[in-house]
């Protein structure tokens, strides 16, 4: 089945300002899109003259250092401990990563995973080991849980820096097990299941094949991962997707797959940092436990967060996303893919090559 990447371009025409030397009518376009799996809508709406400007967060970093509960000198004294049935010593350690209960839990099983010893690590300075150890520590936590109810999801998220909703500067993940993982993931699972029942083929395999053929949003593919940008992104500067072919659950993700993901993620974060992005959200989307059909693939989404105007800390979360649930992009996913293809293509065995114009 050919996936449908539905898009409708709309043109706006207006007169220029009275003081403009050029009085010809101005034409601007926007583009309405629908996600090929869920049908959720979003739009590309280019802001005239928009450029990424990095905000200066140095004062935030320094103000938060003295009281940070995740720094090594305070971590073991002020953070809670896991039940002995999960971790005999009360916490799970792997490299620099430490897992402990979340004081403000999202659900029954809810933990924090600190990633580094350092209080602040710039996005382009994370090591592959730090990124891999953090995810592997979260996976160890999920594997240590007593048998969870059918239909539970292992969820991992990352709010990096305050513009992305971080309540602490110190790099950390949130990990939790829940049967209510949020409307978007539930909808993806439902529609993936429906697609499988209709066509006996995973939607996600069709997505990678279609994107590789088209070339516009496909970035690269390795033995364990496929990298592309989201046709309908949540970030105003577009999202990066990583798919793990034929893997449905975080608990079954291999160490080699985690290492490959960390390699690509490190390169992507460095690329975002280079262009001025100083914050991002990340989520890993896993299938519910005890699913019997191979309809769902584990995948990650990295969503850069920016200030539209750093001088006034102008948030990128507007009424469009917050109240209308309608994301918009000022940079297209196709433009982001072209940029990341340069950075990630050399890391993996297969990289995308955009189709040549006819």
Image (spheres, rainbow, N blue to C red):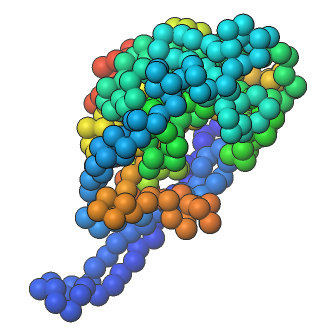
* Most distant residue in the left direction: 21
Q: Residue at x 39, y 35 (%)?
A: 65
Q: Residue at x 46, y 36 (%)?
A: 67
On screen, 231 above or below 66? below
Relative to the observer, which residue lies in front, 206 or 115? 115
Q: Residue at x 16, y 85 (%)?
A: 20
In the rendering, at what x and y percent does residue 237 appear?
A: 40, 50
Q: Residue at x 51, y 64 (%)?
A: 318
On screen, 220 above or below 194? above
On screen, 156 above or below 253? below
The answer, for residue 277, to whether it is visible in the render is no
Relative to the observer, which residue lies in front, 10 or 272? 272
On screen, 199 above or below 51? above
In the rendering, at what x and y percent does residue 282 appear?
A: 52, 36
Relative to the observer, which residue lies in front, 4 or 332? 332
In the rendering, at what x and y percent does residue 196 appear?
A: 76, 32
Residue 143, by quadrant, is top right
Relative to the observer, which residue lies in front, 120 or 242? 120
In the rendering, at what x and y percent does residue 78 appear?
A: 59, 27
Q: How many marks?
A: 0
Residue 297, by quadrant, is top right
Q: Is residue 118 left or right of residue 202?
A: left
Q: Is residue 304 left or right of residue 165?
A: left
Q: Quadrant of the C terminus?
A: top left
Residue 90, by quadrant, is top right
Q: Is residue 91 left or right of residue 189?
A: left
Q: Quadrant of the N terminus?
A: top right
């Amino acid at each position: 089945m050919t996936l449908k990447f539905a898009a409708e371009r709309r043109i706006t025409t207006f007169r220029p300002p009275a003081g403009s030397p050029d009085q010809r009518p101005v034409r601007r376009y926007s583009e309405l899109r629908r996600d090929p799996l869920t049908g959720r809508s979003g739009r590309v709406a280019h802001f005239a003259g928009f450029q990424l400007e990095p905000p200066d967060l140095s004062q935030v970093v320094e103000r938060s250092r003295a009281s940070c509960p995740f720094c090594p000198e305070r971590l073991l004294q002020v953070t809670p401990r896991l039940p002995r049935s999960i971790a005999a010593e009360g916490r799970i350690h792997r490299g620099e990563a430490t897992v402990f209960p979340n004081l403000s839990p999202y659900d029954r099983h809810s933990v924090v995973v600190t990633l580094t010893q350092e209080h602040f690590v710039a996005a382009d300075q994370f090591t592959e080991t730090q990124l891999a150890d953090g995810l592997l520590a979260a996976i160890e936590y999920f594997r240590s849980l007593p048998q969870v109810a059918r239909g539970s999801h292992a969820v991992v998220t990352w709010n990096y820096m305050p513009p992305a909703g971080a309540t602490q500067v110190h790099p950390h993940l949130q990990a939790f097990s829940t049967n209510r993982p949020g409307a978007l993931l539930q909808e993806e699972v439902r529609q993936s299941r429906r697609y499988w029942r209709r066509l006996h083929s995973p939607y996600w395999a069709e997505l990678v094949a279609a994107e590789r053929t088209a070339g516009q949003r496909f970035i690269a593919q390795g033995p364990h991962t496929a990298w592309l940008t989201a046709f309908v992104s949540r970030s105003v500067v577009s999202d990066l997707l990583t798919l793990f072919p034929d893997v449905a659950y975080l608990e079954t993700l291999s160490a080699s797959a985690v290492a490959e993901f960390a390699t690509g993620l490190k390169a992507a974060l460095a690329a975002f940092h280079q262009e001025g992005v100083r914050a991002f959200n990340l989520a890993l989307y896993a299938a519910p436990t005890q699913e019997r059909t191979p309809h769902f693939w584990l995948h990650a989404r990295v969503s850069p967060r920016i200030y539209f105007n750093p001088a006034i800390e102008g948030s990128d979360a507007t009424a469009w996303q917050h109240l209308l649930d309608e994301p918009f992009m000022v940079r297209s996913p196709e433009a982001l893919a072209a940029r990341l293809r340069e950075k990630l293509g050399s890391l993996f065995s297969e990289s995308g090559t955009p189709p040549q114009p006819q």
